Amino acid sequence: MRLSKDFTLQELTVSDTAVKPIKEYFNKPVIVNSGYRSPELCLLVNSTVTSQHTKGQAADFEIKGVSNKELADWIVANLDYDQCILEYWIKEEPNSGWVHCSYSFDLSRKQYLKAVKTDKGTLYSQVS
């Protein structure tokens, strides 16, 4: 089934390398907050037009009842990825924020980052 001129239902629902193993391991629905974004939408949500979302290489998601830190740690330990970013997670609030995960055939930086809001914008640092 074609959802738009650019994507079929199968292209947006089948992934043996990303969301499927996560869902199988945690045995809970994965809530995708953002997947593919057009450059125009990226600008509207204060992202960049060079975001991996514009290439269909990134998704932002969470699982209800699972700490986003636990989710990100599991991804880093078990899956191939380019970037895994723990976005706006607060230690005292385990379900705060979300996980951004990207994959690319060209890039494999294996970056595990944490994003924190500051007065000057978003600050990214390595997760230790």
Image: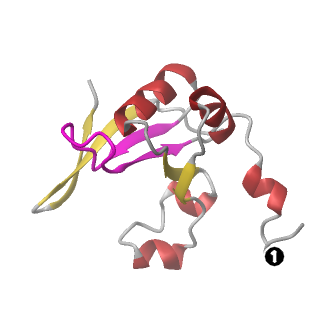
Q: Between 39 and 90, which is closer to the camera in this rendering? A: 90
Residues drawn in magenta: 82-102
Q: Quadrant of residue 1?
A: bottom right
Color scheme of the displayed model: secondary structure
Indicate the secondary structure of the residue bearing disc 1: loop
Q: How many marks are shown on the rendered structure? A: 1
Q: Quadrant of residue 35?
A: bottom right
- 68 to the left or right of 74: left
Q: Residue furthest right?
A: 1
Q: Residues within 10 Å of mark 1 (few under 14, many from 20)?
A: few
Residue plotted at (22% across, 43% down): 90
- 91 to the left or right of 18: left
x%, y% of residue 29? 60, 45
Amino acid on which the number 1 mark rests in the picture: Lys
Residue plotted at (60% across, 62% down): 36
Residue plotted at (80% across, 72% down): 3
User: Vertically, is 70 above or below 100?
Assistant: above
Q: Is residue 49 magenta?
A: no
Q: Residue furthest left?
A: 119
Quadrant location of the C terminus in the rendered image: top left
x%, y% of residue 119? 9, 62
Q: Between 36 and 94, which is closer to the camera in this rendering? A: 94
x%, y% of residue 100? 45, 47
Q: Determine which residue is flagged by label 1.
A: 5
Q: Is residue 100 magenta?
A: yes
Residue plotted at (83% across, 63% down): 8
